Image: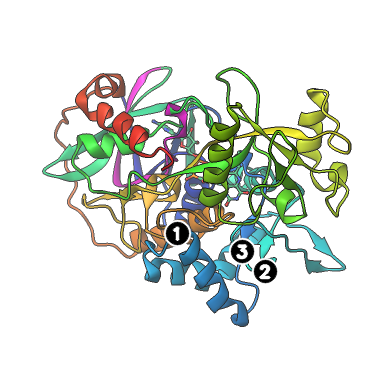
Amino acid sequence: MNVFYGDVVVVGSGVAGLTCALELSKEFDNIVLITKKFLEDSNSYLAQGGMAVMKSVEDRKVFLEDTLKAGHYKNNKRAVEILIDESQDAIRTLVGYGAKFQREKGEYSYTREGGHSVNRILYCGDYTGRAIMEALIEKVKACSKIKILEKYTMEDLLIHNKVCYGIYARGRENILIRGKKTVLATGGIGGIYKNSTNYSHIRGDGIALAIRHKVGLKDISYVQIHPTALYEEGDKRKFLISESLRGEGAIILNHKKERFTYELNPRDIVSQAIIREMKKEEVSHQWLRLSNIKVDIEKRFPKIYEQLKSMAIDPYNEDVPIVPAQHYTMGGIEVDLFGRTSMLGLYAVGEVACTGVHGENRLASNSLLESVVYAKRVAKSIANSRYVKEYKGNFKINNLDSYRNSEVIGEVIKIDKLAKIK
Ligand SMILES: Cc1cc2nc3c(=O)[nH]c(=O)nc-3n(C[C@H](O)[C@H](O)[C@H](O)COP(=O)(O)OP(=O)(O)OC[C@H]3O[C@@H](n4cnc5c(N)ncnc54)[C@H](O)[C@@H]3O)c2cc1C
């Protein structure tokens, strides 16, 4: 078997994995980054709406309250304070890596989504994720300290005496990547759902391995259902109709073309209202009316406009069919405020991790922010962490498939059922 060595092994090429790798490269010379498909194939790349930020000191209290309220006060308040206090620094970091956010006359433009009391979301058209990720990918590719392994799937963790020393992965060949520290940035569990806005290959691998190796989890039954995915028959990934459209004035209607909910409530409330109404009317979807929004749809939301056009829907004159779909995993591998898991040598960041920032329900546009803020903290924490004695012996390894067929992954699927809307 081919063996690679890294000071740090990073698994996953979403915004969390790439930011962490780049920040680590300021301290270490040899980082190995692996990803299941290509660098671009992440949920981060799909993000539309934007990235929240504390606009000014006056916004701190309101942003904190908005996040706690959306999370039904089940959040870890300290983790939220860090998220907010380090948000401007996170934006500066991304801009430093080349990300561009919308500006008007030199000043940032801010939009709004459900649960936010004010406009505080930075964006780039309706393709904010792509704009951020293209900048990060360019930087990672240009960084000689980061070795990139695409089309490799992490199948197991290398563990000895309850310490993690890297991973085992399969791709063109089976490989071991031995590392002093390992960072899981493998995203959420959306891929195991029939109706999800997430990529199907991002399906809780990190969480399955954590369960297998008895690494602590937190809030794992908290799964977010987005109110407005584009309704299409069939099992393929559901296209998201960004909440920013509702921020700009789009309204939700039932089949009698009546409003039945306040569109800018937090996501769980709006999703529950839509599902209740669908049951009442015995229909498979509801409608989103865009014709009355304040901005030009084609200019402000080009990706959504193109998608609707390709389905022969004219958003200026026709209502758009929408249905709630799985969107985000609030729970995950339990981490402290520096991304440390319950296993020595193992860190988690981004959607796979649970810092407790989101509580029971994530406030819109807080996940890109969480990924960047905590990726920076993980990198700092690894740079300052104590030396773990190298282990040179062999490891007992297994394949993910065997876990999937076992009781272990059964638990993840049971969790999926638990997460149904009340
Ligand atoms: C359609 C859509 C729109 C969204 N819009 C927004 C938004 O506007 N604002 C916002 O804040 N958030 C948004 N989100 C959520 C946000 O994009 C994600 O929560 C966040 O980007 C997660 O980043 P991540 O790096 O943790 O994981 P991801 O971006 O999901 O990346 C996970 C990575 O891990 C890799 N991976 C998984 N398993 C393995 C394995 N076994 N071996 C190797 N690699 C593996 C994957 O290939 C991928 O590269 C949106 C999500 C979706 C789906």
Q: Which residue is mark 2?
A: 118
Tag 3–tag 2 contact (CB < 8 Å): yes
Which residues make up the magenta segment? 173-192
- Give the camera-side residue of 297 and 419: 419
Q: Is residue 408 visible?
A: yes
Residue at screen point 18% across, 41% down: 214
Three-letter amino acid code of the residue under disc 3: His
Q: Which mark is residue 116?
A: 3
Residue 228 in the image: state x and y as whole percent. 63, 40
Residue at screen point 65% across, 54% down: 262
Three-letter amino acid code of the residue under disc 1: Gly
The colouring scheme, among rainbow, by chain, secondary structure or one colour, is: rainbow
Residue 361 in the image: state x and y as whole percent. 46, 53
How far apart are the alpha carbons under marks 2 and 1? 17 Å
Label 3 packing within 10 angstroms: few (<14), some (14-19), many (20+): many
Q: Which residue is mark 1?
A: 71
